[in-house]
Image: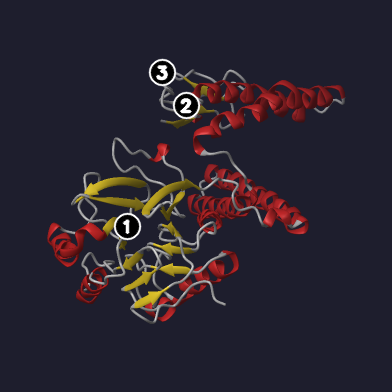
Amino acid sequence: MQKIVKVTEQILRVNGVHSIGVIGDPGCEGLGTYHMKVYAGALEESAKDDMTLIVGDLVPAGTSSHYQMIQEITEVLADNPVYTLRGNHDTGAYGEHFGLQNYALLTEKFAVIVLDNAFRTFDEEGLLLLSKVLAMEEVSQAIIAFHIPVPNHFILNCVSQDEFARLQQAYGPWREKVKYLLCGHVHSRFVDQVDGIPLICTGGGGAMIEDVSKEIKASDVEHHIVHFYEKDGTLQYQFANIREDSYMQEQKDLVLREKLQETVQGELMAHLKYLMFADRAQRRGMGRVANLFRALAASEYYHARNFYAVLQSPKAFAESVPSFLPGEQFEAAHFYRMMGDYAKEHQKPLARYAYEGAAAAEKEHAKLLHAAEDMDGFKENEIYVCPICGYVMSGETMPDRCPICGGPNKQFETFA
C-alpha cells in the first residue's frame, strides 16, 4: 500500500483517525541530505499519529524528478498515510503525483479541509468545497489548511486582505465550527488569533529555520511538527520538536556507517588538498586556476557535509556550543601536547611545531567557546585567524603579528 495518498475525490472519509501530524516545508530549499534528514525525523515523529499532512513545499521546484525523489523517500520512511497540500514551490507536475489540490478529510471527530492558495489566491472550487463541508451536519469541528498565511500580527508575507475576506465569506455562516486555521510557508512557527480563530503556522519540517520577528528568532525555534488530536470532545494541538538524533537508521548498518565515515574523511582531504593548491596558484598569479580549485574545494566540503549529516547526531541548537568544548580541551591539554612531545623526542621538528601551534590554537578555541555558551551575551565582534598556523585571536585591536608563528597581520583573515 502506498504511503502518499493521491487524492482523486473531493471528500474522503477516513476511518479510525483520531490524530493527525502536520509537517511544514520539507523541501523548498532543496532535497539535500541535511534537509531530508530533518524530514525523516518529522515523519518519524508524525508516525505517532494516525495520518500525516504536509502543508506545502514538498520540493524546491515542481518537476517530476523532484516529486519522484520526495515520493521515494516518503514511501520508505513513512509509517502512516501521508496527504499533501500544494505550496508555492509545488508547481508543474503536482497534480500528476498527488491528485486534487482542494479536498476534505472527514474523520469521526473532525474534518480537515485542504485549500490551494499556492499563488496567493483561493480557488473558487476550494471555497465552494469549504462551504459545502462546513454545512454538513456531521461536521462539528474543522481545521482549514492552506500554504500561504492569511494576514496576521507577525509577518507581511501572506495573502491579501481581499483574499482573506473571500475565505471568511466562505466559512462565515459556520465560523463556530472552524477551530483552527493552519498554514506553512514561514520557516519557523507561531500562533496568532485571526478573526477570533487560532492561526497555527508551521514550517519546520526540513527548511532551515528563519527569523520571523523580534519576538520569534531562529535561535529560539527548533525543527518541529504539529500534532492535532481530539480529547474529551475538543480538537487540540501540540508542537513537538524534532530531535537532532531522531532519524539514525543508516548508523545502525555497520557496513554503511564505516563507509560513510571513510567517505567523509576522503571528501575533507580533497577539500583541503584543493584549497592548498588554490593558495599556491593564487600566489603564482594564476587567479582563474585558483578560483577553479576554490570552487572544487567548496564542492568537496558540501559533499562531506551531506555524508556527515547522515552520521551526525548533534545536540539541540541551544545545547550545541557546550558540546564542542570537551574535544577542544582534550586536544589542547592532552593529545596535541602528547604528540608534540613524541615528535620532539623522535626529532621530527615539522610535526612537533604543527602540534604545538595547534595546541595553542585549541586552547584559544576553548576559551572562545566557553564565552559563547551564553550565545545572546557573546560580545566578540571581530575574530582573527592566522592563515599560517591557524591561531585564533579576538579583541578590539588586531595584533601586529601572530603570537605563535610570527605571521604579519596583513595576512590575517578577519571574521566580523
The quarter of the picture where residue 146 lies is: bottom left
Q: Picture coordinates of residue 393 (x, y %)?
A: 52, 22
Is residue 210 shown above or below 145?
above
Residue 370's spot in the image, x, y percent? 55, 22
Q: Name the residue nearer the viewer: 237 or 393.
A: 237
Picture quadrant where residue 58 is located: bottom left
Q: Earlier in the sequence, mark 3 or mark 2?
A: 2
In the image, residue 15 lies at what x, y percent? 46, 71
Disc 1 residue type (three-letter): Cys
Most distant residue in the right direction: 346
Residue at 37% in and 67% down: 85
Please tell me how crowded label 3 is: few (under 14), some (14-19), or many (20+) other residues with Cα within 10 Å. few
Task: Pick the residue in front: 209 or 415.
Answer: 209
Mark 3–mark 1 CB contact (< 8 Å): no
Residue receiving disc 2: 383
Instruction: State how far apart marks 2 and 1 are (Cα).
Output: 41 Å
Q: Amino acid at mark 3?
A: Glu
Q: Which mark is residue 183?
A: 1
The percent position of residue 90, horizontal first and vertical second, equals 37, 69
Q: Of callouts 2 and 1, which one flags the residue occurring earlier in the amino acid sequence?
A: 1
